[in-house]
Every structure is written in C-alpha cells, then in structure tokens.
Image (tube, rainbow, N blue to C red):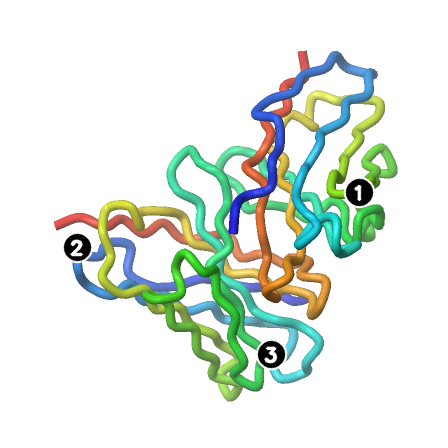
C-alpha cells in the first residue's frame, strides 16, 4: 500500500487560514468516510484532531475542520495561532482492513 | 480515561527480534469496540502503521511488514505485544501503541512512544 499524498510543508501568518490536502485512491480515501487527522509536536505523540472526515473529538478547537471530495481529504485550520505549528498527518481506512498514513505536512506559522 | 504505555528494550541487536508490550489502563481490552495498534516513526520521518489486533486475537498487518510481525494480546493483563523479527538498522524508530476504532480506524488514544535502536 502506498502512503497518502500530502504536501511536505505549508505556512501561514497568525490569524490566517490554511488547508492541507491528503490524496489517496478509491481503495482508501475515496472509498470510505474514515479519514482522520493528527497533530504532532516535536518529541510528542500524535493527537487526534479530526475523525470520520469532519468530526472533532471533544476538546479540539473548532478552528480545525475537515472535508472530503472524491479521493482527496482536506484539513483546514482557521485563525492560525503559534501553537498550531506542528506536523500534521492524515490517515484513512483501507480496503484491506488496514490503516494508511499520509507522508505528513509541516505547518509553519510565520 | 484510557491510557496506554509502551515498554521494552531500547536497544536490539541486528538479526534479533524486537519485542514491545503496551499496557492499557483505565479501560479493558476485552470490552470490545476497538482494535489495538502498533505504529512506528523513523527518526525525522513520518508515521507508519504496523498492524493491529482485536481482543479476540484477530490481526491485520501492513503488507510491507507482515512477514516479520507478530502481534498478540493478553486480556488478563490488558496488554498487547509486538514482535518484529530479523531487525536491521532500518527498524530503528519510535514505536507507539494506540487504541483504534473498529471499522473506521481512528487512532484516538496514543501511548507516549518508546525509542528502539537497532545496533550491535
């Protein structure tokens, strides 16, 4: 299974909005509404931010939102803050009952 | 709330078997509704799903690692374990365990991770 495709890096200024894409195939992202997004700060474990394409776990800011069109899912962060600077990973459930990760995107808050 | 903690040797010799255990607290592996996953992260790289197990013992693996991976569960201790055979330096990584929602594969609770170095 190949990793889902994410941009290596994105950046934005405080207060702005950014979007990170996650592209797969009909066997994963396109075939199921089971895309999740994770935030990882350096030296820390990943934290679930979005599940099932667009749902936020309790405690996650509503500045984080998710969507999907075809085989591409997206994470949007609005009102960027310095603490949003981190690596972001998408995952999808896959046809073979497995989990497939995206390659990760480094978000820089300018 | 549910917490996960990885444990095991931090140094493994090449060609040997890497063995790690994840202990679940604040909940029971046997309660169902979740798979229990292993994930790794090579130094400075992205995350890689290794595989998961259900409390009944059903397992699913990343095809690229399937031939070398064993995942087992001990419901009496609320633990699940990873064994990775014939390791090389390429298996040096931080290894995480995580609770995983059945059918939608959401990794909603993670351990802190444990670093394993493969070196002689």
Q: Check the residue under mark 1 and report the chain it is in.
A: A
Q: Are marks 3 and 2 in contact (CB under 8 Å)?
A: no
Left or right of residue B62: residue A22? right
Q: Identify residue for label 3.
A: B29
Q: CA distance from mark 1 to mark 3?
A: 35 Å
Numbered disc 1: secondary structure: loop
Left or right of residue A32: residue A46? left
Numbered disc 2: secondary structure: loop
Q: Residue furthest left?
A: B120
Q: Could you tell me residue A37's position as x and y percent? A: 70, 44
Left or right of residue A34: residue A55? right
Asked if both marks, 1 and 3, belong to the same chain, the answer given is: no
Residue at the location (19% across, 63% down)?
Answer: B16
Residue at the location (22% across, 57% down)?
Answer: B12
Q: Check the residue under mark 3 and report the chain it is in.
A: B
Numbered disc 3: secondary structure: helix
Q: Check the residue under mark 2 and report the chain it is in.
A: B
Q: Residue furthest front?
A: A26
Residue mark closest to the camera, 1 vs 2: 1
Q: Identify residue for label 1.
A: A70
Q: Identify residue for label 2.
A: B14
């Amino acid at each position: 299974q190949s990793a889902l495709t994410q941009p290596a890096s994105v950046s934005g200024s405080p207060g702005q909005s950014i979007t990170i894409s996650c592209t797969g195939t009909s066997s994963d992202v396109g075939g199921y509404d089971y895309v999740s997004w994770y935030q990882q700060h350096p030296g820390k474990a990943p934290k679930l931010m979005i599940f099932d394409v667009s749902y936020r776990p309790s405690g996650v800011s509503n500045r984080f939102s998710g969507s999907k069109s075809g085989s591409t899912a997206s994470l949007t962060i609005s009102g960027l803050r310095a603490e949003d600077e981190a690596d972001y990973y998408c995952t999808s459930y896959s046809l073979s009952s497995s989990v497939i990760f995206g390659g990760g995107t480094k978000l820089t808050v300018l | 709330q549910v917490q996960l903690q990885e444990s095991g040797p931090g140094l493994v010799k090449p060609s040997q078997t890497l063995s790690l255990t994840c202990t679940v607290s604040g909940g029971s592996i046997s309660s169902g509704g979740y798979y229990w996953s292993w994930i790794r992260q090579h130094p400075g790289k992205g995350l890689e799903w290794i595989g998961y197990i259900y409390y009944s013992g059903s397992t699913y693996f990343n095809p690229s690692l399937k031939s070398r991976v064993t995942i087992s569960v001990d419901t009496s201790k609320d633990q699940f374990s990873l064994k990775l055979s014939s390791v090389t330096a390429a298996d040096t990584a931080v290894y995480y365990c995580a609770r995983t929602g059945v059918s939608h594969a959401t990794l909603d609770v993670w351990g802190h991770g444990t670093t394993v170095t493969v070196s002689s």
